[in-house]
Image: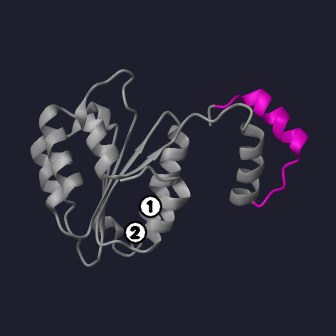
Amino acid sequence: MPRLSQSALLRRLGEKPSSAAIFLHGPEEYLRERTVQAIVERMLDPATRDFNFDQLRGADVTPEALASLLATPPMMATHRVVVLREVQGLGAKAREVVEGVVTRPYEGLVLVLTGTIPSGTKAKFYDVLKERALSVEFGAIDPMDLPAWLIEHAEGEHGVELDVDAARALAAAIGSDL
């Protein structure tokens, strides 16, 4: 599948697909996590969220537990969301489980995979995720683009108008690590 932008991914999920595998990767963790939150809010009804939402870390999950969790159907809802963070920590067997589900997601499952692709890796696993899942890369924000991002974020998230000079000063003071 082609790489998507964050907004294109959220538009696509607004159509409520019957299942999806989503790979959010790159060094910008803040934007990845905000996207995870947006996916969960879009795909789950708050009334059944407790039954249909699970979060895991790659290094902490066994292949058997992962396979069982991913095969669990939604309860009293159309979708179940499983967020698997730090996919770079998965072992070989767990990666096989994930590859199988990414290739053919279970009905009602929205699998969200997040992490960073290790520099210089030749692991086929990441290629499979980028090719088969809805993939969004969150690159580091260029320091030159940070003032514009701050202005947009202040308006969109907080309803506050941020002056250009104030955004530049803020960007210089805090740096580009969101």
In-front residue for pair 1/46: 1
For the point 30% across and 37% down, the residue is 126
Magenta-drawn stretch contains 108:
no
Q: Is residue 70 left or right of residue 160?
A: left
Locate residue 165, reporting x and y percent.
90, 39
Q: What is the quadrant of the C terminus in the image?
A: top right
Vertical placement of 110 versus 67: above or below?
below
Contact, mark 2 vs mark 1 (Cβ under 8 Å): yes
Amino acid at circle 1:
Ile
Q: Is residue 89 left or right of residue 115?
A: left
Locate residue 29, reporting x and y percent.
50, 38
Q: Residues within 10 Å of mark 1 (few under 14, many from 20)?
A: many
Locate residue 5, reporting x and y percent.
52, 53
Tell me the magenta residue range: 159-176
Q: Is residue 72 left or right of residue 52?
A: left
Instruction: Give SS at disc 1.
Output: helix
What mark, if any, has residue 43 been given in the picture?
A: 2
Q: Is residue 164 left or right of residue 125?
A: right
Q: Is residue 84 visible?
A: no
Q: Which residue is mark 1?
A: 39
Instruction: Give SS at disc 2.
Output: helix
For the point 74% across and 33% down, the residue is 144
